[in-house]
Amino acid sequence: MTREPWADVTGVVTAGGRSSRFGSDKALVTWQGRTLLDRACTPLDHAATRLIIAPEGRYQMPGWRVTPDTRPGEGPLAALEAALHAAPDGWVAFTGVDLPCLTRDYWDTLLAARAPGVLGVQALDGLRRPQPLAALYHTSLRAHVTDLLDMGERRLRFAVLAGQVRHVPGLDPALLRNVNTPADLPGTR
Ligand SMILES: Nc1nc2c(ncn2[C@@H]2O[C@H](COP(=O)(O)OP(=O)(O)OP(=O)(O)O)[C@@H](O)[C@H]2O)c(=O)[nH]1
Ligand SMILES: [Mg+2]
């Protein structure tokens, strides 16, 4: 592992979803003064490479490159495939626009949990459920993720095998607020 924890990290925000439950593009909704897209990207600004997985032309974020899906509309596991292929060898810090409360400290904690033989690092929420959409994945998972998708799997939680994932307990559950409907954003009109 490198001494600078962010040196081999690609920050990835996936933003190619339909926001069907939200009712409008949730990436562009402003909450507490910033868009959800901005709130997802900012804690990852220290990453050496920064990618938004979304259709070309929909979003602009200074310092971030938009990369299209390899399988548009096929969900977050397909978005992870696009990210793993676009990223240089190393780690992908993968999240979505619907997790607006993550922080730099959150990602630093996950990065510190990397270890030899570990290919994925996931926080546990207050009910000790692993969080695959705010997690680290090693680029050596490329072939595994592509095989899963080719076999018809779409569940992100299978991106890394049980024996290769490290779980991180004890993070503040408030960091993991997930926005699916407008009711998940109090104070927004
Ligand atoms: N690139 C990409 N991102 C996706 C895709 N599907 C979902 N996402 C993203 O994954 C994250 C979590 O997805 P969901 O909560 O299901 O979001 P969604 O599909 O936009 O919303 P619903 O239509 O309400 O399910 C969000 O950041 C979405 O933008 C996809 O096919 N491609
Ligand atoms: Mg969601």
Image: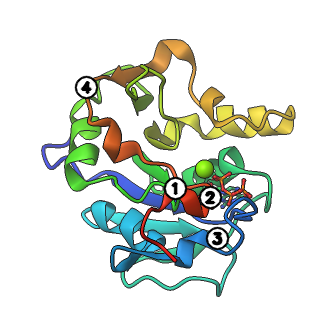
Which dot marks residue 54?
3
Find the distance from the CA under tag 2 to the CA under tag 3: 20 Å
Residue occupying the point 79% across, 62% down: 72
- Describe the element under mark 3 as helix, strand or loop: loop
Which dot marks residue 14?
none
Q: Is mark 2 within 8 Å of ligand 1?
A: yes
Q: Is mark 1 within 8 Å of ligand 2?
A: no
> Callout 1: 10 Å neighbours few (<14), some, many (20+)?
few
**Residue 97 location in percent, x, y?**
51, 62
Badges 2 and 1: C-beta atoms under 8 Å apart? Answer: yes
Q: Is mark 3 within 8 Å of ligand 1?
A: yes
Q: Quadrant of residue 43?
A: bottom left
Badges 4 and 1: C-beta atoms under 8 Å apart? Answer: no
> Callout 3: 10 Å neighbours few (<14), some, many (20+)?
many
> Callout 2: 10 Å neighbours few (<14), some, many (20+)?
some
Residue at image mark 1: 184
Q: Earlier in the sequence, mark 2 or mark 4?
A: 4
54 w.r.t. 56: above or below: above
Find the distance from the CA under tag 2 to the CA under tag 1: 6 Å
**Residue 105 location in percent, x, y?**
19, 48
34 to the left or right of 154: left
**Residue 141 location in percent, x, y?**
57, 35
Colour style of the rendered protein structure: rainbow
Q: Earlier in the sequence, mark 4 or mark 1?
A: 4
